[in-house]
Amino acid sequence: MSVRQHRVVSGLVALVLALSGLLALPSQARAATPVCALACDTLDPSKAAQETFAVPDRNINGRILRLHVSEADSMAWAGIDSGVTGDAVWLDRSWDRGATWDGLLGKAAIPGTWTGTRTLMCNVTDPVGHRRGWIRACGDANAVTCTDSFRPQVCDGARVRSTRRPS
């Protein structure tokens, strides 16, 4: 059997194994596992117990990128204003101090005649998993940037105090 024939046969065997599920081929990144604490990820921001701005806003080509935080809920959401149709906003959340990120959480784009939009809220803490996360707002308005990251200092179930960290 020639080298070329051997490569073709090897490729066909790999394809058959992959299709039968016996060989794992690379796949796209999987969505972040939703977190449920006081409420589950994707809660509407209108349900927030409070709203603070824990980190400075960012300017992306004249658009305002903002991270909103409700420490009472231990949740955050992102907003983009002064934008145009198609500008997008989302949250990035990390459970390992920024080594890896659950990205594109709640991604939303500005529709038709609007000039801004926001994401749904996502948890900053995971009491069940004994985790405190870092969270930041990110946006795309002909350039991509993110705000500084926010992280609660204490998560004792009664009160959450926080710090911010440059991204």
Image (tube, rainbow, N blue to C red):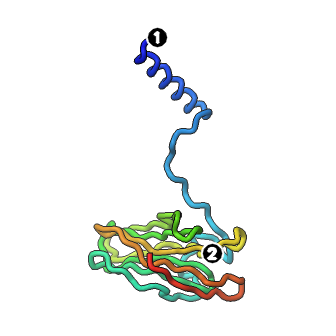
Distance between the alpha carbons at the discs numbered 2 and 1: 58 Å
What residue lies at 58% left-to-right and 34% top-to-bottom? 23
Among numbered discs 2 and 1, the one appearing first in the sequence:
1
| Residue 75: percent from left, percent from top | 58, 78
> Mark 1 Cα within 10 Å, few/some/many (few <14, many 20+)?
few
What residue lies at 65% left-to-right and 75% top-to-bottom? 39
Say whether residue 110 is visible. no
> Mark 2 Cα within 10 Å, few/some/many (few <14, many 20+)?
many
Say whether residue 23 is visible. yes
Identify the image quadrant of residue 155: bottom right
What residue lies at 57% left-to-right and 38% top-to-bottom? 24
Identify the image quadrant of residue 46: bottom right
Label 2: element kind: strand
The residue pinned by badge 1 equals: 1
| Residue 149: percent from left, percent from top | 49, 77
In front of the other: 50 or 71: 71
As drawn, which residue projects farthest toward the front?
Answer: 3
Quarter of the image that includes the C terminus: bottom left
User: Taking 59 as reference, is 20 left or right?
Assistant: right
Vertical arrangement, residue 107 with respect to residue 49, above or below? above
Task: Evaluate if marks 2 and 1 touch, with contact meaning CB atoms under 8 Å apart.
Answer: no
In front of the other: 61 or 110: 61
Q: Residue type at mark 2: give it.
A: Arg
Q: Which mark is residue 160?
A: none
What residue lies at 67% left-to-right and 88% top-to-bottom? 159
Q: Residue type at mark 1: give it.
A: Met
Q: Which mark is residue 132?
A: 2
Label 1: element kind: loop
Vertical arrangement, residue 28 with respect to residue 142, above or below? above
